[in-house]
Amino acid sequence: MTDMAELPDEPTGWLSDRELEHVRSELPLVYVNVVPVRINPMGEVTEVGLLLRAFDGGISRAIVAGRVLYHERIRDAIVRNMEKDLGLAAMPQVPMSPTPLAVAEYFPTKGVTPFHDSRQHAVALVYVVAVEGHCEPQQGALDLTWLTPEEAASDEIASEMAGGQHVLLRQALAHCGALT
Amino acid sequence: MTDMAELPDEPTGWLSDRELEHVRSELPLVYVNVVPVRINPMGEVTEVGLLLRAFDGGISRAIVAGRVLYHERIRDAIVRNMEKDLGLAAMPQVPMSPTPLAVAEYFPTKGVTPFHDSRQHAVALVYVVAVEGHCEPQQGALDLTWLTPEEAASDEIASEMAGGQHVLLRQALAHCGALT
Amino acid sequence: MTDMAELPDEPTGWLSDRELEHVRSELPLVYVNVVPVRINPMGEVTEVGLLLRAFDGGISRAIVAGRVLYHERIRDAIVRNMEKDLGLAAMPQVPMSPTPLAVAEYFPTKGVTPFHDSRQHAVALVYVVAVEGHCEPQQGALDLTWLTPEEAASDEIASEMAGGQHVLLRQALAHCGALT
Amino acid sequence: MTDMAELPDEPTGWLSDRELEHVRSELPLVYVNVVPVRINPMGEVTEVGLLLRAFDGGISRAIVAGRVLYHERIRDAIVRNMEKDLGLAAMPQVPMSPTPLAVAEYFPTKGVTPFHDSRQHAVALVYVVAVEGHCEPQQGALDLTWLTPEEAASDEIASEMAGGQHVLLRQALAHCGALT
């Protein structure tokens, strides 16, 4: 229940599943983590989208996450992973800069950093990305919920997130001036 | 020719011109500096907009700049100053975060920092903002030119900018991965 | 009790108190907000310093805050304000970059942004700065307390801070990977 | 001559050389890129350290670069790679935050991004790190030169750097307010 949610459904890049499994225990993988939001014309965050995912016996809320593939730019990985999780009609406003608002180091061992992923060591570049289109949860997600920034930052929602992603969510909201 | 270009035409906030003149020599003023760009659907910068301005006997290229007024949020100041310089149809995509990509400290004395403004000490928060609409130079600007990122970063253009703004322009382009 | 704590004891720059009072109601002022921390040799935050301040009848915890004066660089303002609040032996490691981790917009009206200062509109550039020397609370502060990052991020401490500074404190800790 | 310089001498992590060779053509690798600097007590950059490296028939200047290994934190990777390139007495001041000032996407194909590495796709997190101790070039470097920020940003030095690292160098200097 503490894995970054996207992995079972993700394309394996150019490695076979077996090779990827091996590499996961040998190298840190590059990820993007994206907090999808809706904004008003003044750029203010009005809603935050959280996915609902099932894991071995549990359920948790998650932000959009996925690997950066070989020969894929970060901006392309952001779009691909958002479309994978939110559908082809999501219409994300791709960030102009590849510089993330934060870097989350997911470790397979708990307590090394605030972030944990039992299957791997992942270095995730974190972004907030506005969507303009229609979003719906794709395969691998049970639901997609839009929350106000206040709701998204609540302790209740934090308790429903895994791997430390509630820290990223709050950091992203603070970055946007939407955390009170 | 080394002043931040927007000042003669700017609203004086809630201070009289005379009071503002006095304050300029007593307090640092808060500014926004905005590099207006056009982007493609992948968020890549395709064009950079530079204003052409006349100063006491000279001409220079400039980015959008202007004060943050009393009780005005940074996002509102960005929109107001972009509309002041580029017109009401510019349709800027307001940034989600007030955190700037850089802070430029303009000093009335040359050489203290890379940035100089003979009239005042200004602390400018620097942003890159995409425009989606039609832009045209407003009162106080002679022209508005759209350049490729390569052209905008050239030594020729740098030599036509004042106050150190060529440094900000290149930093903004590097931030967007558009500086080669 | 919701004012940025440093103001009563702050130098007035080159304006008289009366002039400054007037300007405060006419222009946004430039501030630095600094979260003072102790770090270990690996750069990890081990302790966070919070000041205890008295206000009209109340007490609250606060980070280091103060104005940027006319013709003062941000790095000089950081050092001066840290020495003002923590003493001359604090030995702050001045940041290499003037780019802040966040910008806090303090408004005299509540609810415009997460940050509030009843006396003025202040645009505060936010930094985390490590201190290597001995710190003690200066005039205007009742105490200086060093907390673990966990304690500093707790709801209890948040309830003892004013003006929205608990948001900045948590954002600063998240920025350093010290928020769990 | 356009490869990120550190690779021949780098530890292979927990993969065999042969496996790493294979993975390099299948997955993006996580790197740190560090601009080593000397600073004065006010945090201003006074000198920039550049390595001189030999490649198949050529010589180029380079910043510190190296992989992040499996189960290695970014801050540990920064220290390890700085010690690898500058020696054990370099005494780097490890950054408090893992958030980089920029992300450089090195592609094996030229022209996709400003950054190129013929052997691999590397996603490099870019930092400026001050060194307080004695630095000397280690195995794999011919020399270590300390330049003023002005010299480091010159077109002459840019022409001696490979893979687009001159862009990072200038971006890092601009970030520190040391680019004029």
Image (cartoon, coloured by chain):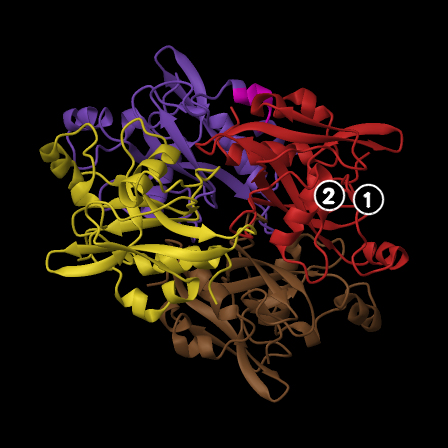
Chain colours: A yellow, B red, C brown, D purple
Tell me the amino acid under the disc marked 2.
Lys
Q: Locate residue D93, reporting x and y percent.
A: 44, 49
- Chain of residue at mark 2: B
Relative depth, front residue between D36 and B171:
B171
Relative depth, front residue between D147 and C108:
C108
Magenta extent: D153-158
**Tag 2 residue:** B84
Query: What secondary structure predominates along the stretch shown in magenta?
Result: helix
In-image side of D44 versus B52 (left or right): left
Say if residue A112 shows up in the picture: no
Alpha carbon distance from label 1 to label 2: 9 Å
Residue at x 61%, y 25% (from the top left corner): B153
Q: Nearer the viewer, mark 1 or mark 2?
A: 2
Relative depth, front residue between B130 and D106:
B130
Q: Which class describes the residues within 10 Å of circle 1: few (<14), some (14-19), or many (20+)?
A: some
**Tag 1 residue:** B9
